[in-house]
Amino acid sequence: MAFSDESLVAGMASGDTTAMAAFVRRYQARVYGLALRVTDDSGLAEEVAQDAFMRAWRYATTYDARRGGVGPWLLTIARNVSVDAARLRRDYPVDPERLIGALVSTSDEPEHERAEHLVEGLRSLPSEQARAIVLAAGYGLTAREIAEQEGIPLGTAKTRIRRGMVRLRHALGVTS
């Protein structure tokens, strides 16, 4: 008898280790795959996957089905842990294209279409602007950190982020 994702999360919220084991079996390949795409390191991806599942276990009581499905909830946790792990590895170059690809791969219907639209918008920007936006919004880097990583003046980093956001809003048809 297969249990729904929601019933497994409810079981996890009540401390049911059997539900947790079934949940891990169901999602381990997707979580590990996402972590590997973002970190590009199999050992680190295994650690990230384990941490993501531990966070899902810890925060199962906060899951709200009205805000989205279990898959996107878990993969958002995994993406956040992956990005944090990649940022902590300062010796490892951050590749924003990995995060852009991860946006689409972690989205379930109907979010998948919106994520594809966002990726199309990012890819329509000049590469230096798209990279600055992804580094700022996706990796949480400050303008100063982006300037250091890219080897550009701080003002240039700020301008790339600002102009990129204006162009992205236009590309996505957002009016404010």
Image: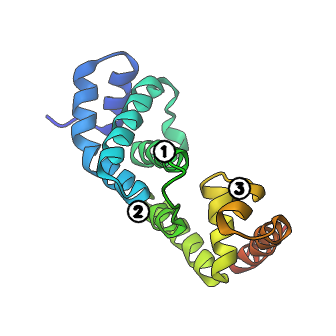
Q: Earlier in the sequence, mark 1 or mark 3?
A: 1
Amino acid at the residue labelled 2: Ser
The tag on residue 145 is: 3
Mark 1 or 3: in front is 3
The image quarter in which residue 148 lies:
bottom right
Amino acid at the residue labelled 1: Ala
The image quarter in which residue 155 lies:
bottom right
Q: Residue 45: image x %, image y %?
A: 34, 47
Q: With 90 as the anchor, is 14 left or right in this view?
A: left
Q: Residue 70: image x %, image y %?
A: 41, 42
Secondary structure state at the residue bearing disc 1: helix
In the depicted structure, whether residue 118 falls above or below residue 38:
below
Residue at x 71%, y 74% (from the top left corner): 168
Q: Earlier in the sequence, mark 2 or mark 3?
A: 2
Residue at x 77%, y 58% (from the top left corner): 143
For the residues labelled 2 and 3, say whether their Cβ atoms are less than 8 Å apart.
no
- Which of 115/1 is in front? 115
Residue at x 37%, y 58% (from the top left corner): 40
Secondary structure state at the residue bearing disc 3: helix
Secondary structure state at the residue bearing disc 2: helix
The tag on residue 85 is: 1
The tag on residue 105 is: 2
